[in-house]
Amino acid sequence: MVNKTRESAIKTLEFNPHDLACEELRHVYRGKNSGKLIVLFSGLVAAAMLAWDIGGVYAGAWYAWLLIAHAWHWWLGRLDFLSANVSIELARINRHVMAAGMAGLGWGALSIALPLLGRSSKAAILIIMLIAVIVALPRLVVFLPIFFAFAIGVYAPLLLATPFLDFETLHMVLVILVVVGATLWASASEVRKILIDVLLKQISSEQASWEDRLTGIGNRRSFDANMATTWAQASRAKVPLSLMMVDVDFFKKFNDSYGHQAGDECLRQVASALDSCARRTGDSVTRYGGEEFAVVLFHTPLNEARNISDSMLTAVQKLNIRHEQSTHEIVTISMGIATIVPTMENSMQQLIEEADKALYRAKENGRNRAEWQILSPTKEV
C-alpha cells in the first residue's frame, strides 16, 4: 500500500500560492543596497536642484519624506526577515505593499515641482526619476502587488502634473510611463518562472527529508510532526489516541548472524508488513530509529489498537524470515501500546514514555507479544 505517513508529510509541503508570494517578497529585498545608494545620492542631487529653483524648505521636506518612506520600506526587509524558514503572514505582506507605495510616492512627489522648474531642471529631475525607477522596479516586479503599489506612487502624481507640462517635458514623461513600464512588465514572467522553479526544488528536497531512505516509510522527523498534529486533533475532538512502539526482536543477533544487507532487507519487509496493517485515515507508521518503529493511531481506543497490534504481529510472523538466534526461530516483533485522551494535564512525551515502558514489559515477558497501558481511562477508551 502507499505509505500514508509519506503522503501526509508531502501534503503539508505541497506547493501553494502563499509559498510563492513569500519567496517573491524575499526576492524584492535581495540586493537592495544599490537601491539605498541611488536614493541617498540621486535624492540629494534632486533636492539640491529643487532648492536652487524653488527653495530649501520644499527641497528639505521632500528629501526627508523620501528617506523616511524608503527607510520604512527597507526596515521591513531587514536581514533577519530574509530567513528561508520564515513564513510571512498575509497582514505582514500588506504592510510591505503599503511601504512600497509610500516609497514610490517619495519619487512621485517630485512631479509636483515640475511646472515650477526651468527646462534644464525638468529634464534633470525626470532623468533622476527614471534612474530611480529603473533601479527599483526590476526587483519589485517579481511581486506584483508591490510593483503596482510602487508604480502607482511614482506615476500617479506624474499623471496629475501632465496638464501643467510643456510638450517636450510631456514627451519625456510618456517615455518613462510606456517604455520603462512595458520593458519591466515583459521581464516579470521570466523572473517569476525562475522563482517558481527554485521554490519547487526547495519543496522537493524538503519532502525527501521526511522519508526514511531504507524502508520507504516516514522517518523520525515525520513521526515528530505527525505526532504533534494528531495530538492536537485528538485534544480538540476529545477522542482517544493510541501509540505503538515496535521493536524487532533480537535484531542485533540477526545482523551478526546474517550480515547488514540481510538486516536492511529484514527492516524493509517488517516496515512494509506494519504499514499494510495501518490502513485507516490518520494512521501512520514511521521508523523511530534503528530497528524500532512507531505507529500513531488517531481516534483509536485501546481495544482497537490491540486488534491492530495482533494483525501486525501476525503479518510479521507470516514473513517467515529465518532467525536461528531467536527463541522463535523466525523474525518477530515486540510492541508497547499506550492510549490516552489528550488533555491539558497530559503531554506527548508522557504518552511516548508509557508506550516505551509497555514495550519493555513485552520484551521482559517473552517477546513476540504486545503489552499496553491506559493513561486516561474513560468510557471512550
Image (cartoon, helix red, strand yellow):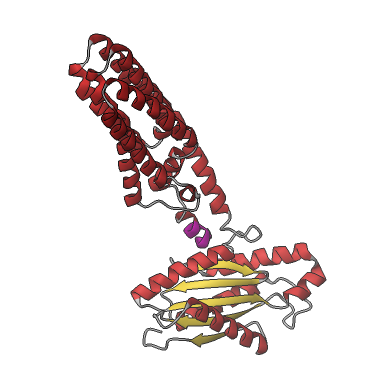
Left of 298 or right of it: where is 147?
left
Can you say whether 77 is above or below 180 in the image?
A: below
Can you say whether 6 is above or below 227 in the image?
A: above
Furthest toward the top, the residue is 168
Residue plotted at (44% across, 82% down) = 346
**Quadrant housing residue 295:** bottom right
Residue plotted at (46% across, 53% down) = 86
Asked if the stretch drawn in magenta spans residue 248, the answer is no
Left of 21 or right of it: where is 94?
left
Q: Which of 118 and 73 is in front in this view?
A: 118
Left of 269 or right of it: where is 93?
left
Q: In which quarter of the image is the C terminus?
A: bottom left
Residue 32: x %, y % from top left: 47, 36
Q: How many marks?
A: 0
Q: Is residue 105 visible?
A: no
Residue plotted at (39% across, 25% down) = 45
- Magenta residues span 1-9
Q: Which of 140 and 154 is in front in this view?
A: 154
